[in-house]
Image (cartoon, coloured by chain):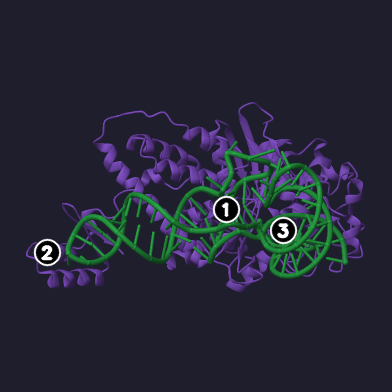
Chain colours: A purple, B green
Amino acid sequence: MKLYNTASRSVEEFVPIENGKVKMYCCGPTVYGYQHIGNFRSFFFEDILKRVLQYNGYDVTHVMNITDVGHLTSDEDSGDDKMEKKAAEEGKTVWEVSKFFTDIFMKDMELLNIIPPNTFPKATEYIQEQIEMVKELEAKGFTYVTSDGVYYDTSKFPDYGKMARLDIEGLRAGERVEFSEEKKNPTDFSVWKFSPKNEKRQMEWDSPWGKGFPGWHLECSAMSKKLLGNHFDIHCGGVDHIPVHHTNEIAQSEAANGEKFVNYWVHGEFLLMGDEKMSKSKGGTLTIARLKEEGFEPMHYRYFLLNAHYRKKLNFSEEGLQGAKNAYEKLKERILSLKEKAANENLTDTPNNYKEKFLEKINNDLGITEALAVLWTMLKDDTLSANQRLELAYDFDKVFGLQLDKIEKAEAADDIPGEVKSLAGQRMQAKKDKNFALSDELRNKIKEMGYEVKDSKDGYELKRL
RNA sequence: GGCGUGGUACCCAAGUGGCUUAAGGGAAGAGUCUGCAAAACUCUCAUUCAUCAGUUCGAAUCUGAUCCACGCCUCCA
């Protein structure tokens, strides 16, 4: 299969380090707030990547960190700690805040049918590993100490910014770049930060350099090393991580470990809202819970995401989501009717190449939109038996993750209130008596109670609205 | 200011030199069915790919210019 590698800025053939196995690390959430649907676009893309790897027969070890250490509101080592700030606002401990938002995150991941990573390491549970890495960097001469922390000297790392193709001179000339007096280079960053002298932090640890907390790029380097090794296959995240976060991870890991860090860097694009990036600072973020309030199920959002390639910006709109909802509901109907047909049908096997087409699409840098087109075309192909189509749909769904195999008749008869059922029965009788005025009246009554009556050849069907 | 990405139908979007006389979905319209609806099914829906030049036997796809939008350089998926 082929994947776009940010490091080479080109689509490359994927070759794992160890035959048949893939180790991948994905940057996870910071748990001082709700993850919005834009954040989930990234986790969704990583899920698709993992599913495609698995579909190709790879044994995937997937790690996603939980950033529960508060970072500062600025990358320039100033500002408030977001975690501590949130805790103060809520009158809770930072640990409570972290747990609260982690739990919600996990729940949303499940609702979106994202396969859980093998491990969800928390930054606070790997403090020792992070300290070890700073020690290693210090021993190798990559660090220096200032009044507020231990810093990484990026001028010591020859290839600094190579993946991101950073123009260091350009950064220096930039209008918006300011940097602290004590930093030797504008791109230097802290690997260990000292606790402020005059205040007690809720999260702080002893270290050889004094009480404090780890720098915010360090956890990924330290935890991936511990869980996946010095050198592994794939590292994912949002495109915003390219210039700073991932650039610094490479610098730390390769300097400390003395070997190549990651083979394939894969980044997902943003979800936009009103042509602008959806972000907390710009307001107007939406959560899975909020979508539910608006009548959209997590699967509707998942289907929505399936409509765009992961490296393209995707504009979120209610209209777009509604379109995805309609499409997904139709897809469900189609699966249901195939299930009925399949039950009483002779097993036949018509030769076809849909699976090959599907594989070709997903293996071409996760061509999920085209793969979805293959699904639709296949479902409409009458030369295939219902059984064949169902089988293929379930097979493709290993990648789509739309829970097609879980689709049942919308309403089991028991769930419908007796009164609604009785009204529906009366309507049927009225219809038989050709009393259409009464029949329509009853249908409206049922509708008011939240159900829709659909007539079929041999009766009727009730569906919740 | 520096760096980068993208502009394809009413909407979301594939496609990145000939197999495409531009996928798929949504919306819309027409028809079949129906007492009427709904659902389902069938059909229709871009001679055109922001604009203008150019390269080529051939361009949505390559080159240049222009216009527009967005992202990164600030924690951010």
State the residue in front, A447 or A152.
Answer: A447
Say which chain tag 2 marks. A
Both labels 3 and 1 in a single chain: yes
Crowdedness near tag 2: few (<14), some (14–19) or many (≥20) residues, C-alpha within 10 Å: some
Q: Amino acid at mark 1?
A: Ala
- A72 left or right of A279? right
Query: Considering the numbered disc 3 on the image, is that residue within a helix, a strand or a loop?
Result: loop
Q: Amino acid at mark 3?
A: Glu
Asked if the residues shown at circle 2 and circle 1 are in contact, with their CB atoms under 8 angstroms apart, the answer is no
Mark 2 vs mark 1, CA separation in Å: 46 Å
Residue at the spot 42% in from the left edge and 36% down from the top edge: A392
- Of labels 2 and 1, the one closer to you: 2
Relative to A356, say whether A172 is above or below: below
Give how far across and how far down residue A146 sits, in percent: 89, 59
Q: What quarter of the picture does the C terminus of chain A occupy?
A: bottom left
Q: Residue A431, which numbered label?
A: 2
Give how far across and how far down residue A236 sits, in percent: 66, 46
Crowdedness near tag 1: few (<14), some (14–19) or many (≥20) residues, C-alpha within 10 Å: some
Identify the residue position indicated by label 1 in the image: A308
State the residue in front, A368 or A154.
Answer: A368
Q: What quarter of the picture does the N terminus of chain A occupy?
A: top right
Give how far across and how far down residue A3 sits, in percent: 66, 40
Mark 3 vs mark 1, CA separation in Å: 42 Å
Give how far across and how far down residue A382 sits, in percent: 35, 39
- Of labels 3 and 1, the one closer to you: 1
Residue at the spot 38% in from the left edge and 43% down from the top edge: A405
